[in-house]
Image (cartoon, rainbow, N blue to C red):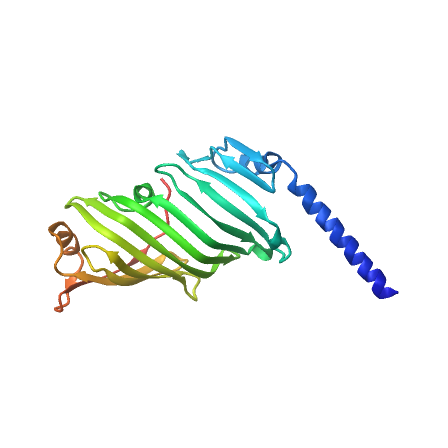
C-alpha cells in the first residue's frame, strides 16, 4: 500500500512539474526577458515569441548593434535536469553569425556544444591592444565542447581559424593565408593553444598558454624566407635559430578590454 501511494505521489509530482513547465513556456518572452534586459547596460529594441521559442533583436551594447538572436528550448534536456537551448545568431554582412546548443544546469553549470561562430577580423580591432595594426579576413570558431562551472573553465575543445588573413601595419600590408589555433582547456582553468598554418607564407608553428589571471605566454617560429613586410615585422622580436627559422617568445598579461 505504501509503495502504491509513493508511486502515486511521484506521478502527481511529475504531472504538476510538467504542467508548470508548460505554463511557463507559454509566457510571452517580452514579459520576462524585457524586465531582465531593462536592468542591463544596453538597449533592446524588441523581444518577440514565447519563452519556449523566441527572438531578441535590435540589441545595442556600448554603441555597437548586435545581430538578432533566436532560440528554442530542447525538451529532452529537461529530463537530465538541464535547460537546453538551440540558438542562432542571424548576423548580416559584417556582423557576427553562428549557431549552437547551450545547456544550463544546477550550480551555475554552463555547457556549449556544436557551436560555430563567424566574425570579420576587423571587428576585433576596438577590443585589442594593437595600435597601428589593422586586421582583415574572417575568424571562425568551432567549439565541440565548452563547460563552465561557477565561472571556471572545466573543459574546452575547439578550433579558431583566421581565413584570408591580412594585416596592415606601419611596414605595409601582408597576406597571411589561413592560420588556425587548436584550443583546449588546462588544469588551471585556462586555455592552451597549438598554432598551425593551414596555408600561407610563414609556416607558422607554436603554442600559447593563457591563465584566468590574464597571464599568458607564447612561443613559436616562422620560416626565415619571408616577404619583406613580414621580415621587417618579425625582426623586431624574433631571432635566427641557425636552422632556417626565426623563433620568438612572448609573455605578458592580457584581459579583453572594451572601448
Which quarter of the image is occupied by the N terminus? bottom right
Q: Position of residue 150 (x, y in %)?
A: 53, 57
Q: Is residue 69 above or below residue 221?
A: above
Rendered-image quadrant of the C terminus? top left
Q: Residue furthest right?
A: 1
Residue found at x 51% / y 56%: 111
- Residue 141 lies left or right of residue 246; in this view the side is right
- 232 on left or right of 35: left
Which quadrant of the structure image shows residue 10? bottom right
Query: Most extreme residue toward the bottom, as rendered?
Result: 243
Task: Tell how many labels.
Answer: 0
Q: Which residue is farthest top?
A: 45
Q: In the image shown, does 219 or 223 lie closer to the viewer?
A: 223
Observer-nearest residue: 140 or 237?
140
Q: Is residue 175 above or below residue 241?
A: above
Instruction: Name which quarter of the figure residue 39 lies in.
Output: top right
Image coords of residue 124 (percent x, y): 33, 44
At a point 46% along the width and 54% down the height, the residue shown is 114
Name the spot of residue 116 as percent of width and height, x first.
Answer: 42, 50
Q: Residue 68 versus residue 229: which sits nearer the camera?
A: 68
Query: Residue 77 vs residue 174: left or right?
Result: right
Above-or-below relation of 91 to 11: above
Amino acid at each position: 500500500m505504501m509503495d502504491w501511494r509513493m508511486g502515486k505521489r511521484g506521478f502527481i509530482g511529475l504531472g504538476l512539474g510538467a504542467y508548470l513547465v508548460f505554463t511557463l513556456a507559454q509566457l510571452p518572452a517580452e514579459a520576462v526577458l524585457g524586465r531582465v534586459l531593462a536592468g542591463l547596460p544596453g538597449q533592446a529594441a524588441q523581444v518577440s515569441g514565447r519563452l519556449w521559442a523566441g527572438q531578441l533583436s535590435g540589441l545595442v551594447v556600448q554603441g555597437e548593434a548586435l545581430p538578432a538572436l533566436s532560440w528554442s528550448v530542447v525538451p529532452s534536456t529537461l529530463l537530465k535536469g538541464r535547460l537546453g537551448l538551440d540558438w542562432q545568431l542571424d548576423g548580416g554582412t559584417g556582423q557576427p553569425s553562428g549557431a549552437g546548443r547551450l545547456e544550463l544546469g544546477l550550480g551555475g553549470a554552463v555547457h556549449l556544444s556544436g557551436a560555430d561562430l563567424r566574425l570579420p577580423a576587423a571587428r576585433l580591432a576596438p577590443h585589442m591592444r594593437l595600435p597601428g595594426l589593422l586586421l582583415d579576413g574572417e575568424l571562425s570558431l568551432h567549439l565541440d565542447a565548452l563547460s563552465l562551472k561557477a565561472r571556471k573553465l572545466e573543459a574546452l575543445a575547439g578550433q579558431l581559424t583566421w581565413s584570408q588573413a591580412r594585416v596592415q601595419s606601419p611596414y605595409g600590408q601582408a597576406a597571411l593565408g589561413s592560420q588556425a589555433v587548436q584550443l583546449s582547456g588546462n588544469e588551471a582553468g585556462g586555455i592552451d593553444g597549438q598554432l598551425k598554418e593551414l596555408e600561407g607564407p610563414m609556416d607558422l608553428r607554436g603554442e600559447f598558454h593563457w591563465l584566468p589571471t590574464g597571464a599568458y605566454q607564447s612561443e613559436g617560429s616562422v620560416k626565415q624566407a619571408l616577404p619583406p613586410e613580414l621580415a621587417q615585422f618579425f625582426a623586431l622580436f624574433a631571432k635566427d635559430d641557425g636552422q632556417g627559422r626565426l623563433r620568438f617568445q612572448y609573455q605578458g598579461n592580457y584581459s579583453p578590454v572594451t572601448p
